[in-house]
Amino acid sequence: MGIICEEPPSLLQDLKITIQNVSLVFPSQQTERKSMFLSNIDKVLNFPVETVHFFPSHKDFPPHLVAEKLKNTLARLLVPYDFLAGRLRSNPETGRLEIDCNAAGIGFAVASSEYTMDSLGDLVYPNPAFGQLIVKRMDNLKQDDQPLCIVQVTSFTCGGFAMGMFTNHVTFDGLSFKIFLDNLGALAADKPLAVIPCNDRELLAARSPPCVSFPHLELAKFVDSNVNPPVFDATSEALDFKVFRLTSGNIAHLKEKAKASGGTHKDARITGFNVVTALVWRCKALSWDEETTQGSNNNADRESTLLYAVNIRPRLIPPLPRSYTGNAVLTAYATAKCKEIEEWPFSRLVEMVSEGAKRMTDEYARSAIDWGEIYQGFPNGEFLVSSWWKLGFDEVDYPWGRPRYSCPVVFHRKDIILLFPDIDENNGVNVLVSLPSKEMSKFQSLFLNYLA
């Protein structure tokens, strides 16, 4: 049985943060002034990403020394990552979004909290107050001069500290951000770069002329190309949120369930991600509140479309370098009627999920990129599974040790379900779900019953 957080624990609402200093960090050497092309994938992901990395106290690295070392290290890192010190702009000739690599710098803040790290409670449980560990904008700069990255070091009274990072998603996807952190740790330890970054975003440029060779059910056209398309529309509904914790034993149980119901569905890749995502899809689809539809029996015939991101680096011909710094993820999908999702054996749901990634060949990926060139589209589905589970942010080696925990600062959305690692068990996973109260009750009942 998975460990379910029945109700959100008592969470600190105010971390009592004092910002002591805010400054800009510039590249330590002169970098070339140039414009960086952004791919159609990058352009859609023009929104902020916030992560917090918690570190226990270290006798040789008190927080003030860490802050000083990080600031110096970031200046050196902005040489190979020169685009990070640039600014977003629209090309005056084409109107296309790009990065002006103008060495304008990234933000850096030093802060302190009146609490110990242990006073924060369960670090795994998403606390909106963790947003106080991140500076989101530089108040002394104009809107069009805001940095693409801001780092905040917050010390706690126990000697531990948090490194909060604000980045624009156009700069990195999860895999390239992990490499950026690896390089940050390496330079801070006076070692060479762990991986030399590949900054050539032209590698994911659309073909000329564009050639859309597949139907892209996972994408929707965006009519007004002058406005940045939303990835999903926010809802004004009141939402409950819960974390469903799955142990490695729970995940093994789901894998066995998929094998046991295998029958003719032997092509399913029975991975941890696929079985957890299949379970989440089933629970989400069947927890739909029928009162919101026109009639009580509509949910059975309603189509539910699951979306999730697939790394296309190894899928292209030739493969993209692992060191590619931009966004090299595209949206995979699975879609079925709710009555099918309810009646199918679990293996079939796992197969449907695995087919989404299997569909992502070189030609399919190029077709999706070309589709974006024509239609300026964005992902389209009932909900998105966003997985931070295996990114390994808490495995980065810094001179002061690895993080106790690394996590996104989440905002609760009914159309985004988040998978993130457990703090105590490497192979466990936490599933963050936000739903209206009635749907949450159904989701939880379905989730528990399926694990029984």
Image (cartoon, grey):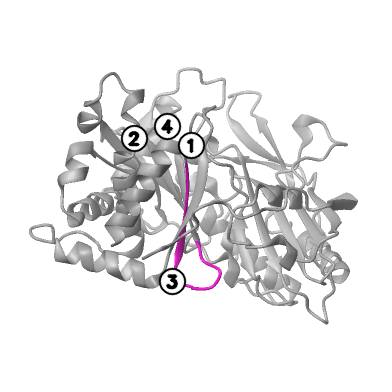
Query: In the image, what residue occupies the spot 74% across and 44% down?
Result: 33
Q: Position of residue 273 (x, y in %)?
A: 36, 60
Dot 4: within a 10 Å radius of its alpha carbon, few (fewer than 14), some, or many (20 or more) residues? many
Mark 1 lies on residue: 40
Query: In the image, what residue occupies the spot 64% across and 28% down?
Result: 91
Gap in angstroms between the C-alphas marked 4 and 1: 6 Å
Q: Are marks 4 and 1 in contact (CB under 8 Å)?
A: yes
Inspect the image, locate mark 1, and give the three-letter code of the amino acid beneath it: Asn
Mark 4 lies on residue: 372
Marks 1, 2: nearer the viewer:
2
- Sequence-wise, the earlier of marks 4 and 1 is 1
Tell me: residue 428, above or below residue 212.
Answer: below
Gap in angstroms between the C-alphas marked 4 and 2: 30 Å
Inspect the image, locate mark 4, and give the three-letter code of the amino acid beneath it: Gly
Mark 2 lies on residue: 288
- Sequence-wise, the earlier of marks 3 and 1 is 1
Mark 3 residue element: loop
Inspect the image, locate mark 3, and give the three-letter code of the amino acid beneath it: Asn
Q: Nearer the viewer, residue 70 or 34?
A: 70
Gap in angstroms between the C-alphas marked 1 and 2: 33 Å
Q: In the image, is 393 to the left or to the right of 252? A: right
Outermost residue on the right side: it is 20
- Sequence-wise, the earlier of marks 3 and 4 is 4
